[in-house]
Image (spheres, rainbow, N blue to C red):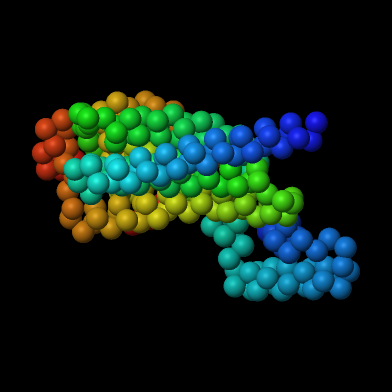
Amino acid sequence: MADVLHFVRDALSILLFGLGCIAIVTGAIGIVRFPDFYTRLHAAGVTDTAGAELIVFGMMLQAPSWMVFAKLAFISFFLFMTSPVATHAVAHAAWVGGVRPMLGPELERGDIE
Amino acid sequence: MARTLILAIALGGLWLLLSGYFDKPLLLIFGAASVAMSIYLARRSEVIDAEGVPSGLMPRVFLYWGWLAAEIGKSNIEVARRALAIDMKLSPTLVKIKTPTRTNAGYATFCNSVTLTPGTVTVDLEPSYFVVHALTRDLADEEAILDMGRRVAALENPDAHDGEIGGRVT
């Protein structure tokens, strides 16, 4: 029975690690391919949320004790709380600094309204 | 007083989980002493208020985070598809959203949720509205964003004295 549980745990965490890696690579590809500053931030968001969280969840399954599990849960929670603040700080700095986004399907530089 | 108690429970729980000493009385006393010291300093510097201990959204905010995680998953797939597609078909859009939230904690939670969801980033905050940059027209769906805001507004405790949104937020 314990063997089966071990197998399920390993399989699940390999799945989570794999999905997390795919999310991080996809985010990196997006950062290179998207056309301007603001659209690149969205690609970084994929790395921030799906990438980081899935890998931490995968590690939580492999944790040797509840202590380690709790600490990983804290890391996941703090990432969840702080990464949008960092993203907003960068976006707002660009906005106040006068970087205007490319808008619409033709990607023209524009302002709101 | 309620906020002091909440802060004490949170700090005590954090100390226990990070140190992992449950059965060494001397170390537990040191832990309790450090929590007491932190509470004393926080009270003295008067940071135990709606901003320092924003407990107005608790405990229902945990359910909301579960719902938010599902939303994040969905929009992650959408943004990843765009990043990998041969023809990306981007149509970046700026939208102004009037927030339905009333408290500072609710406003911050709403804006952070919008930023946390891939495909939408909050770029500017004003007391009456905020500006969202979205990757495509579909992701800039005003109704969907407002629906998220209304969920946060439903968490707000009307008598928690969490501070009205006001003053310049920039």
Is residue B101 found left or right of B142 in the rendered image? right
On the image, the x and y values in percent for residue B117 come to: 41, 38
Which residue is depicted at the point 76% across and 35% down? A3
Tell me the quarter of the picture where residue A107 sits: top left
* Location of residue B35 with respect to A102 vertically, above or below: below
Tell me the quarter of the picture where residue A33 sits: top left
Q: Nearer the viewer, residue B169 or A66?
A: A66
Tell me if I can see residue B158 in this picture. Answer: no
Q: Nearer the viewer, residue B97 or B138?
A: B138
Q: Nearer the viewer, residue B58 or A71?
A: A71
| Quadrant occupied by the C terminus of chain A | top left
* Location of residue A106 with respect to A41 vertically, above or below: above
Which residue is depicted at the point 29% across and 33% down? B84
On the image, the x and y values in percent for residue B10 come to: 69, 56
Tell me if I can see residue B45 in this picture. Answer: yes
* Location of residue A15 with respect to B107 vertically, above or below: above
* Location of residue B11 with respect to A95 vertically, above or below: below
Which residue is depicted at the point 54% across and 35% down? A15
On the image, the x and y values in percent for residue B52 come to: 57, 60
